Image (tube, helix red, strand yellow):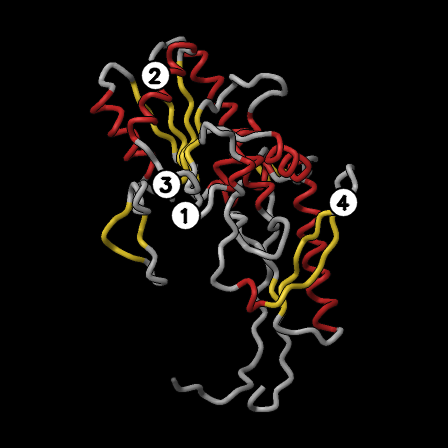
Amino acid sequence: QQQGYELRVIGVPKTIDNDLPGTDHCPGYASAIKYIATSVREMACDNEAMGQGDLVSIVEVMGRSAGWLAAGAALAKRRDHPHDPPHLIYLPEIPFDQAKCLEDIRRVLKREKFCQIVVAEGLVDGDGNYVAADAATDAFGHALLGGAGDALAEILRVNLPAVKVRVAKPGLLQRCAAHAASKTDADEAFLAGQAAVKAAINGETDKMVTLVRGDAEHYTCETGLAPLADVANSVKKLPREWINEDGVSMNFQFLRYALPLIQGEVTTPHDNGVPVFAHLDKIRVDKQLPAYEV
């Protein structure tokens, strides 16, 4: 702008963490929780098939500052089966209390042969300190998280030595498991991209495309625009009223929010039994601008 160059900037949200303000949800979030819920349900089947008592299975999912992904694991429960796994979900929004956690696990193991836990990587204690933070930081100054799942497993090994503990970390698979993509999510991602191009053509700039949920009982979604300044350096937390009083399970308000987002399956082309994904041709253009010095 200072040089008189016509530049229009439109952001399209894409974080699976779903923690950007101004939008009902972010493209990518629904497919991530569909994968997480599916994996938790499959792991629960494996735990049940083992037939071993006093087993605690921990799944650590992403979510540095907000528990949207961990909460999504609640979708693994069947309708009208409140005791289905995951039995306990530990979120960054609820300070971690070790004594309560141990009591939670004992309570589940009295009723079930195994206890399925989902924990967000950004779990914090009552003082706001990460339960599993390294001394190192990333390029943005954020603490590198050393593994909330492993930290919880160590607590159990020390305090409940008779319990067998195993930890699973989906890691980057939460972001790239396209075979478990939500059709609703994929459609809305295209919608958001189209809205961004239209906004730029129409002269908008310094805006982010938002997804706006309709007010009708039947789920609908359209796009809007929010100023980038209102979105940057802000975090949208999981509403406390969507978490049950016990602090380790989700209520109907979250389910009503999340269930419409994961509906539908994406048909992926396969070759030799494995998915085929598009690869963009990297067509380079000649350099147009003079050398830039900092």
Residue 197 in the figure: left or right of residue 281: right
Q: Are marks 4 and 2 in contact (CB under 8 Å)?
A: no
Dividing the picture into quadrants, the one containing residue 152 is top left
Mark nearer the N terminus (1 vs 3): 1
Residue 183: quarter of image: top right
Q: Quadrant of residue 137?
A: bottom left
In the displayed structure, 287 sits above or below 133; it is below
Per the rendering, the mark at residue 270 is none
Reading the image, the residue beneath label 1 is: 64
Q: Which residue is mark 3?
A: 123
Q: CA distance from mark 3 to mark 2?
A: 20 Å
- Residue tagged by mark 4? 215
Instruction: Measure the C-alpha gap from mark 4 to mark 2.
Output: 42 Å
The mark lying in front, picked from 3 and 4, is 4
Q: Secondary structure at mark 1?
A: loop
109 to 175, vertically: above or below? above
* Local SS, label 4: loop
Badge 2 amino acid: Arg
User: Is tag 3's residue or tag 4's residue first in the polypeptide sequence?
Assistant: 3
